[in-house]
Image (spheres, rainbow, N blue to C red):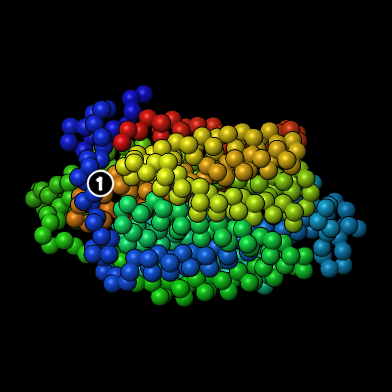
Amino acid sequence: MDPPENDAGNGASESTRLLPEASRTSARPTATSHTRSTWPWMYVVSLCVALAILVDIGEYLIFAPRIRLYESIVCTEYYSHVDPSLVGQDGSVPEQLCKVNPVQDEVAMIFGMQLLFDSVASILLPVPFGSLADKYGRKWIAVMALFGYLLSFAWTLFSIGVLHLPLPFVWLSSLFFLIGGGPVTATTLVTTIVADVSPPEKRSTTFLYRFTSELVAECLVPPIASILMERSPWVPLLLAVGFFTLGLFAALGLPETLPLPDNGADDREEGQEEIPDEITKDGMWSKWIHQAKNSFSFVTRDMAVASLLFTFLVSKVGRRSIDLLIQYASKRYGTSHQANLLISLRAGVNILLYLAVLPAITAFVLSRTNPALKDLSVAKGSIFLMILGTVALSLSSTPAVMIFGLIIYTFGTGFGPVVRSLITSLVESHHASSTSDIGRLYALIAVMEGVGAFVAGPGMAGAFRLGLKLGENWLGLPFVVAAVLFALAAGVVFTIRV
């Protein structure tokens, strides 16, 4: 197919750069001069990183213990019918007996459906909440989203531990995402705040530091969670509630960073139209449709932006395969405790990548390249490594091959942050006076990833269950699916011109 090009009405062609030199350098000379925040931009970014670390610690305290908790519930129910003599007086079953296919199949189904329901909120809520954030401010919507996320997890623990409801009742936790939009909206708005205050030439590196917060938690927390799990899965799960609460209080301390309007600039952005009188007369519904169309014209006027948005969808589906890594390794090689350490391995490689490898590449190897082309070059190398890594994981008949594949895959995970930086530059190049599109842009990215998660939840769980039925050699089937999806994303990235 023809390469996606920037066709914003400026006569761009295959041989024309999408971002003229002037637009790259003048779009936002100083980030802090356009926002309501009077804080130095590094202070704001540091607080966002601290907030993200607190919430991410909570998430990684949940990850493996929740799998083990669900597995123990399903396992006890299974052996109560099959062989009650294996159920202890306390209602527990030895973990090694819980690796049978019927139990693992049920656990995969529970998690797959949970991802499906969570994804509904990720698809429907980010755009309206992102539009509200562009109009009224980022901070309080982010606070609401974090509060809804806290209530969601609290319901999961309450329904199992206090009410002792059947396990499928945990799916109701997704309803609490209606408060603020849930974790996807919270993550989107924290990243938007970082984009609001970061100078354009430092944005790509700042995004890497922003997403390193998750990696710090991912590296340090799983070994601690594994130790705590030896006493009971409930210990790390209850501790996670405390970290979520601390993250909520950190969000309350954030400054408002919504960009200030530039009174000297035309209020209408490039590509937007005035609302015709006849539409106004037809009623509020027609007016709302026309305004919504104008609000997202930054996508329809630029095929490069639309194409890059598509990569967030397919790469999200592919990345979901890694969520099955613990269950995959647990089924093939042993217990959840050792498999949980794979998360720390992946995080350690990611931290090295984000804090050392990619900044060094952008600062030295690509130092003479303009920011957009620099991001595109890193994205191409990253998606190639993700394809290679998932292929290796799919063929991992031994732990050594699995670890090799995981390391190669992880070295490609800078794809998301650098593509986010690239697409931000493309959108900002259309108007130098503000960043009013960024909240909606990141909301659309969240929707694309939400659609991806919506498909990936049952899809990857179904691929894993199919692999269980086909035999041990097919347990890596989800990683085969991921490799194909990453290849689709590569097809887009390698045809973009900047």
Q: In which quarter of the image is residue 400?
A: top right
- In the rendered image of this protein, does residue 221 appear above or below residue 20? below
Label tally: 1
In the rendering, at what x and y percent does residue 146 appear?
Answer: 47, 67
293 or 171, nearer to the observer = 293
Question: In this rendering, would 451 be left or right of 427?
Answer: right
Residue 322 visible in the snapshot: yes
Q: Residue at x 41, y 62 (%)?
A: 190
- SS label for mark 1: helix
The picture quadrant where one finds residue 92 is bottom right
Q: Going by the picture, which residue comes out furthest to the left?
A: 277
Three-letter code for the amino acid on which mark 1 is drawn? Arg
Q: Height in image: 259 above or below 333? A: below
Front residue of 341/105: it is: 341
Q: Looking at the image, which residue is at 33% across and 28% down? A: 3
Q: In this view, does 169 lie above or below 403?
A: below
Badge 1: few (under 14), some or many (20 or more) residues near its Cα, within 10 Å?
many
**Residue ID at (27%, 53%):** 437
According to the picture, the residue beneath numbered tag 1 turns out to be 24
Image x and y of residue 463, in percent: 63, 38
Residue most toward the right? 85
Residue 115, visible in the rendered structure:
no
